Amino acid sequence: MTRTKMGVSVRTKLVDELDFLVEECADLGASRSEIVEAIITAYLQSDEERIKKTRELVISNRKRSNS
C-alpha cells in the first residue's frame, strides 16, 4: 500500500482532541498520523450519507471561522 504525505491545518481544539486520542492509544504506540488515518477510514467506510455530512461540516466550520 502506497502512502501520500499531505499537510493539513486544523483548529487547535481538534489537535487537543487528537492528542488525547494519541494518549489513550499509548499502549498501541499510535501516532497522530495513524489516528487520523483510522478516523478518516472509519468515516469513509460508514453507511451514513458521507457527501451530505461532509458538506454540512464544511459549511458549519466556515460559519464558525467567520464569526
Image (spheres, rainbow, N blue to C red):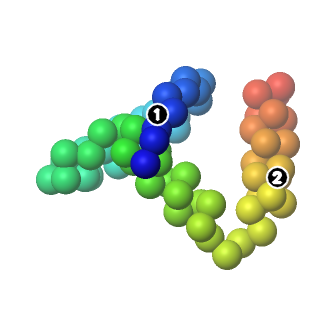
User: Does 34 sit left or right of 28 as displayed?
Assistant: right
Instruction: Determine whether the residue tagged by mark 2 lies in a helix, strand or loop.
Output: helix
**Whole-percent x, y for residue 57 in the image:** 76, 48
Of residues 21 and 5, the one nearer the viewer is 5
**Image mark for residue 46:** none
Q: Is residue 62 above or below residue 54?
A: above
Given residues 12 and 50, the one toward you in this image is 50
Residue 13: horizontal and vertical position, in percent?
A: 52, 34
Q: Secondary structure at mark 1?
A: helix
Amino acid carrying mark 1 in the image: Val
Write the residue at 76% across / 28% down.
65
Residue 17 visible? The answer is no
Task: Give the image location of residue 25, x and y in percent.
Answer: 25, 52
Could you say which quadrant of the image residue 63 lies in?
A: top right
> Is disc 1 surrounded by few (<14), some (14 to 19) or many (20+) residues within 10 Å?
few
Q: Residue under circle 2?
A: 56
Q: Please tell me which residue is depicted at 84% across the width and 42% down the height of the picture.
A: 59
Q: Are marks 2 and 1 in contact (CB under 8 Å)?
A: no
Disc 2 and disc 1: Cα gap in Å? 21 Å
Which residue is the site of mark 1? Answer: 15
Quarter of the image for residue 16 reads: top left
